[in-house]
Image: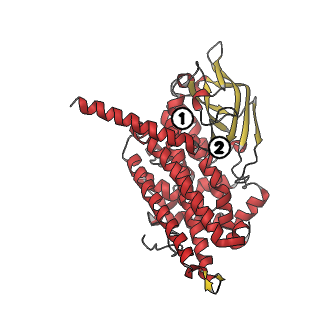
Amino acid sequence: MTTPSFGSTLPWAEPSCHRKLRDAVRKWCEEHIVPYTEEWVEKGAIPIHLYQECAKAGLLVPIAAGKSIPPEWSHYPFIGDIPASEWNGFHDLVLWDELIRSGSIASLFIGLTVGAPPLRQFASKSLQDKIFPEILSGEKRVCLAITEPTCGSDVRNLATTAERSADGKCYIVNGEKKWITNGMFSHYFMTAVRTGGPGAEGISMLLIPRSEGVRTRPISVMPGPLSATTYVTFEDVKVPAEYLIGQAGAGFKQTMINFNHERLWAVFQALRGCRTALNDAFEWALKREAFGKRLIEQPVVRWKFGNMGRKVEALQAWTESVVWESENLSDEEAGRLLGGVTALLKVEAGVVAKSVAEECLKIMGGLGLTKTGQGSRIEAFYRSVPSLVVPGGSEDVLIDLGVREALKLSRQAEKARAKI
C-alpha cells in the first residue's frame, strides 16, 4: 500500500491510480453530489435535471464506453480532460471508484453502463447514429432488461417473445422483465427476447423504445429507491425491425459478453464500499475508548483491520489484473477467456464485501446500525451488500460457471498442444 496524495491517509482507505482523473471526478462530486445525498435518499429520487448536468461535466461518454472510447465520440466533453484515444480500463475503474465513493450518484448510471455496450458493440451503424446522440447528451436514458420473474440467472430459458410481423417491418413484443435497474426513468430498454425456438439459440437482443404497450412500476428493494428498480411489462409492443441488435439468435452470446463488464462494475462497487467502511471504522477506532483503551489499542481490533486490509488489497490486485487483461484483448477474446475469471472475481468481491461490512459494523457498535452520523456509510454499505451478490449472477451460479469455463479452456489448450 502506498500513501495517496489525495483523500484519506488512513490504511487501505484509498487506492492509488490515475490521480488527475480521480481528483477531477472527486472535485465535481464533492460539489454537486455529496452535499445532497441524504436529501435525495430521504426523498427517494435524484433530481431529473442532474443527468444532463452529468453529460455537460463529461461523465456520460466514458460511462457508456467502458474500457475504450470510439474516435467518433471525441467531440463530447470528458471529465478530467482525458483524450479519447488514451482512455482505458483503468480510467473506467477510477471513474467508477469515485462515483461510488460519492454515494447516491452511481445509481443514476447503472442503466447506461450495462445498456449502452450492446448498442455500441453489436448494433448497426444507422441505429447507433440515431440513438447515441440522444443518450450521450443526456436527453434520453437506456437500461438493460434481461431478468424475468421466472428466469433469473437462467437466461437461456427467458420467456419474453418478439414475433416478426406479417409484413416484416416490426417485432411484436410480449412478456415481463423484473428487477430492471433504472427502468422507471429509461426511454430505451436493451432487451433480451425470444425470436426463435427454445434455448440459447432462440434469443435475440432488441432495443425497445418506451412506447404504447410498455408499462413500468417501481419495485422496493433493500438498498433503497435511488436505483429505480423496475417491473417492466411489454404488451403487444411494436418495435421497428431495424432495432434488432446484430443478428437474430445472437442475443445470448451478446448478453454473456455484456455480463463481463457488469460483473466488473459490481467488483468496483465492492472495492470502494470496503475502503469507505474501513476509513470510517478506523476513524472511530482511533478515538473511541472502551475498557480503558482506545479501540485501536486492542489487539483483537487490530487483528480485524489487518485481515480486512489484506482481503481488500488482494481483491484490488486481482481486479486490476482482470482489467489489464480485458484492456489487452479484443472484445471477442475477452468474452472467451475472461468470462469464468470475471464470474469468480465477482464472487470474491461479494465475499470480501460481506466480511468487511460485518467487521466494520461490529467495530462501530451501535453507530453501525444507525442511518445518520458517523456510522451511516457503514450501515448503508452493510445493507447494500446483497445487491452486489445477487444481480449479474448469484454466487452459486457464478462459481459453477467459473469452473465450467476453466475446464473448457483447459480442454481447448490440450487440443491445441496435441496439434503441435
Nearest the eye: 302 or 270 = 302
Left or right, 37 with reference to 327 = right
The x, y position of residue 228, in whole percent, is 71, 47
Where residue 33 sits, quadrant-wise, is bottom right
Nearest the eye: 418 or 261 = 418
Q: What element carries label 1?
A: helix
Residue at image location 68% in from the left, 64% down from the top: 379
Mark found first going from the N terminus, 2 or 1:
2
Q: Where's the C terminus, which quadrant?
A: top left
Q: Mark 1 is on which residue type? A: Thr
Label 2 and label 1: CA atoms lie apart by 19 Å
The x, y position of residue 273, in whole percent, is 58, 61
Q: Nearer the viewer, mark 2 or mark 1?
A: 1
The x, y position of residue 256, in whole percent, is 51, 36
Q: Bin the neighbour count of mark 1 within 10 Å (Cα to Cα): few under 14, some 14-19, many 20 and up.
A: many
Q: Mark 1 highlights which residue?
A: 255
Nearest the eye: 394 or 228 = 394
The x, y position of residue 226, in whole percent, is 71, 53
